[in-house]
Image (tube, grey):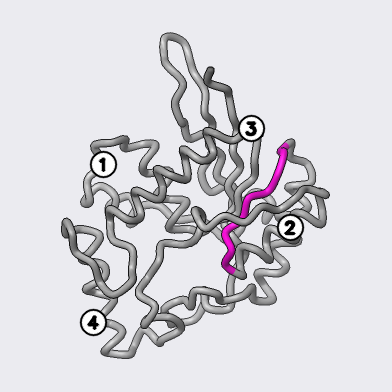
C-alpha cells in the first residue's frame, strides 16, 4: 500500500571551490561561509518534523549533515545515490581557463545530449537520470514518512526535473531545466509522495529553493 511521504532535500553549504573559477573537486570541503550557512540551516532544521538524515558522502554534504544532526539529534545515513552529477575525474580542481580541461568539459557536456556518449568516467544523460530514478525509488520504499536528504545542486535539480517532466523527458528538456533553475547553498527543496482527488500516488514538487533562513 502506498504511503504519504514528505522529503526535505537540502543542498550543502558553500564549498571552498564553489566561488572559485575552477571545476569543483569531488571532495571540496566547506568554506567559512559554508560553515556559517550550515549553522543557519541546522537552526532551521531543528524546527522541522523529520525522521532521519540521509547524506551524500562528499565532504561538503557530510559536513552540512553533521551540523543538522548536532542540532536535531537525528542519525545520519550515508548513500552514494545522492552524490553530485559526476564529472570526469581529470577535471577535479582544475581552473576553468585550462585549455585541456575546457575541451574535456565541452565533450562531457555533449554526453548529456548524445545517446551512448561517454567521456572518461563522467556520468552521461542515461547515468544521471537512471540514478535519479533509483534515488526516488529508494526514498519511496523507505519506512520513514519524512527523511531529510543532504545532496547537491545538479543532482537535486535532476530529481525535480524527472518528477516534473516525467518518463518522456528528453536530453534537451533536462538541459533547459538546468539552464533555467538554480539552488542556493543550503536551500530546501520539498518533495511529497501523495495522492490527490482522482489522482494516484506520485511524486510532487512542493517547494523549490527555499532559503528563507537567510532573511535578516
- x and y percent of residue 154 in the render? 43, 58
Q: Main secondary structure of the magenta part?
A: loop
Find residue 155 and report its horizontal and vertical position in percent.
44, 55
Badge 1: how crowded within 10 Å, few (<14), some, or many (20+)? some
For label 3, the residue is 143
Q: Residue furthest left?
A: 115
Residues 36 and 156: in front is 156
Q: Which stretch did the figure color magenta? A: 50-58
Kindly identify which residue carries mark 2.
Answer: 40
Quadrant of the image containing the C terminus: bottom right
Q: Residue at x 43, y 81 (%)?
A: 92
| Distance of label 1 from label 2 (alpha carbons) | 35 Å
Identify which residue, 100 or 32, lies in the foreground: 100
- Mark 1 or 2 closer to N-term? 2
Q: Secondary structure at mark 4?
A: helix
Q: CA distance from mark 4 to mark 1?
A: 27 Å
- x, y percentage for residue 65? 69, 58
Q: Which mark is residue 103?
A: 4
Q: Is residue 52 magenta?
A: yes
Which badge, 4 or 2, comes first in the chain's sequence?
2
- Dot 3: within a 10 Å radius of its alpha carbon, few (fewer than 14), some, or many (20 or more) residues? few
Circle 2 residues within 10 Å: few <14, some 14–19, many ≥20: some
Q: Horizontally, is 56 left or right of 198 in the view?
A: right
Q: In the current view of this chain or complex, which residue is farthest to the top?
A: 198
Q: Are marks 4 and 1 in contact (CB under 8 Å)?
A: no
Disc 4 crowd, CA 10 A, few/some/many (<14, 14-19, 20+): few
Mark 4 → mark 3, Cα distance in angstroms:
45 Å
**At 49% from the left edge and 53% from the top edge, which residue is drawn?**
81
Query: Is the residue 215 above or below the residue 122 in the image?
Result: above
Amino acid at each position: 500500500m502506498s504511503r504519504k511521504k514528505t522529503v526535505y532535500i537540502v543542498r550543502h553549504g558553500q564549498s571552498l571551490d564553489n566561488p572559485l573559477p575552477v571545476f569543483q573537486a569531488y571532495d571540496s570541503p566547506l568554506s567559512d561561509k559554508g560553515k556559517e550557512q550550515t549553522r543557519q540551516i541546522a537552526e532551521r532544521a531543528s524546527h522541522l518534523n523529520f525522521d532521519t538524515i540521509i547524506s551524500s558522502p562528499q565532504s561538503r554534504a557530510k559536513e552540512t549533515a553533521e551540523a543538522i544532526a548536532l542540532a536535531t539529534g537525528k542519525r545520519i545515513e550515508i548513500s552514494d545515490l545522492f552524490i553530485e552529477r559526476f564529472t570526469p575525474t581529470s577535471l577535479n580542481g582544475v581552473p576553468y581557463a585550462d585549455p585541456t580541461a575546457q575541451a574535456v568539459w565541452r565533450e562531457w557536456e555533449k554526453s548529456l545530449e548524445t545517446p551512448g556518449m561517454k567521456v572518461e568516467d563522467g556520468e552521461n544523460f542515461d547515468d544521471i537520470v537512471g540514478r535519479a530514478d533509483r534515488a526516488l525509488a529508494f526514498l519511496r520504499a523507505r519506512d520513514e514518512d519524512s527523511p531529510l536528504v543532504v545532496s547537491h545542486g545538479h543532482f537535486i535539480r535532476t530529481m525535480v526535473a524527472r518528477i516534473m517532466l516525467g518518463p518522456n523527458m528528453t536530453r534537451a528538456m533536462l538541459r533547459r531545466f538546468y539552464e533555467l533553475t538554480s539552488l542556493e547553498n543550503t536551500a530546501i527543496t520539498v518533495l511529497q509522495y501523495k495522492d490527490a482527488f482522482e489522482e494516484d500516488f506520485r511524486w510532487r514538487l512542493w517547494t523549490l529553493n527555499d532559503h528563507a533562513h537567510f532573511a535578516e
